[in-house]
Image: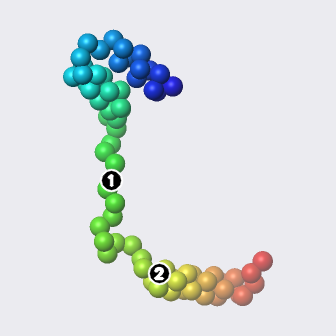
Amino acid sequence: MLSAAEATLEQGAEDEGERRRIRAKLYAPPKGSQPQRGARPPGMGLGMGDAQALAAQLAAEDARLTGGNTG
């Protein structure tokens, strides 16, 4: 549907510059939208070993709170 709208708008363009402006306006993010955050920098988050240790701690705490009954 978007490519059909793009083709219709481009047909009315008189030169390549106008086509580029139409395309830029068509694919621009909505006004008022927040810019997307980039990827996290290295060193943020948990490594695999840390995640497994945290999961083990959570399982132990869960077993302690439920009295060892799981189900």
- Residue 25 vs residue 68: left or right? left
Residue 26, image quadrant: top left
Q: Which of marks 1 and 2 is nearer the N terminus?
A: 1
x and y percent of residue 69 in the render? 75, 84
Which residue, as the protein is rendered here, is positioned at the far left?
Answer: 17
Q: Which residue is drawn at 26% across and 12% down?
A: 14
Position of residue 49 in the picture relative to residue 41 (left or right): right
Can residue 61 be seen by looking at this rendering? Answer: no
Residue ID at (24%, 17%) = 15
Residue 11 spot, x, y in % from top left: 36, 14
Mark 1 and mark 2: span between their CA atoms? 24 Å
Q: In which quarter of the image is the C terminus?
A: bottom right
Identify the residue shown where x is 47% and y is 85%.
49
Tag 2 residue: 48
State the residue position of label 1: 37
Q: Dot 2, crowdedness within 10 Å: few (<14), some or many (≥20)?
A: few
Number of numbered discs on residues? 2
Identified by mark 1, the residue type is Arg
Image position of 14 with respect to 42: above or below: above
Residue 58 in view here: yes
Q: Position of residue 45 (x, y in %)?
A: 39, 73
Q: Pick whichever, 20 or 26, lies toward us.
A: 20
Q: Which of 22 and 69 is in front in this view?
A: 22
Percent across and percent down for residue 19 are 28, 22
Kind of element beneath mark 1: loop
User: Residue type at mark 2?
Assistant: Met
- Between 11 and 23, the residue placed more toward the observer is 11
